[in-house]
Image (cartoon, helix red, strand yellow):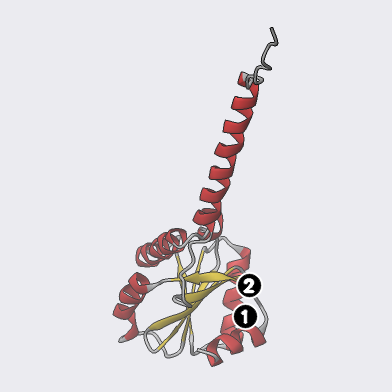
Amino acid sequence: MIKKKEKPKLSLLYVVVIVLIILVSISVVIISISFNKTPRNGEGVPLYLGSRIFGKIVVDELEVSLSQFQDTALPNPCILMFGLTTCPHCHNMYEFFQKHYPDNYRAFWIDTDRTAAELFMMLVDIETKNGVPQHYAMAVPQTVIVVNSKVKAVVIGEVQEAEFWENLLKNN
């Protein structure tokens, strides 16, 4: 009598390897999606890391909070910098803006001004909800460009290139 060939049995090791590959693939997809939560269809305002564009973020909540200042003390257009009094990069930007934009610039020191700290934490929350990694969102200095009560751009970090700032103010 002729014996039929038996199908080889999948070993447990092969099953475990396949399941692991599937789980890793799913994890990669989830992580990719979470880091790419930038608004679709061109919505939102540009977010820069230094002078390079990172993506776009929706800042409606921040605009509402900033509107309480817009009628009183803020010029138009306005450059708002959030910083720490102990941060050398923040002081460099403070000096840069004082030199180039003294009438359009306001510094918000988040370690000495409670309102500034609350606005900054709102900005951090908005950025993280839009997929910005927390270590970037918590960084200072952060500069917000406001024109006609609308946030036009957010810049994280020190950028001392006058042309960069001129383009942000002109194109918005």
Of residues 146 and 131, the one nearer the viewer is 131
Q: Quadrant of residue 70?
A: bottom left
Residue 96 is marked as 1
Label 1 close to label 2 by CB (< 8 Å): yes
Residue 55 is marked as none
Mark 1 lies on a secondary structure that is: helix
Give the amino acid at mark 1.
Phe
Task: Name the residue rendered at 46%, 76% in the picture.
Answer: 41
The x and y percentages for residue 4 are 66, 15
The x and y percentages for residue 14 are 64, 25
Of residues 90 and 42, the one nearer the viewer is 42
Quarter of the image with the N terminus is top right
Mark 2 lies on a secondary structure that is: helix
Task: Name the residue rendered at 61%, 32% in the picture.
Answer: 18
Mark 1 to mark 2: distance in Å?
6 Å
Residue extending farthest top: 1
Residue 92 is marked as 2
Task: Name the residue rendered at 64%, 83% in the picture.
Answer: 164
The x and y percentages for residue 101 are 55, 88
Give the amino acid at mark 2.
Asn
Q: Residues within 10 Å of mark 2 (few under 14, many from 20)?
A: some
Name the side, left or right, on which 66 lies relative to 80: left
Of residues 47 and 26, the one nearer the viewer is 26
Question: Is residue 8 placed above or below 17 in the rendered structure?
Answer: above
Name the side, left or right, on which 31 lies relative to 50: left
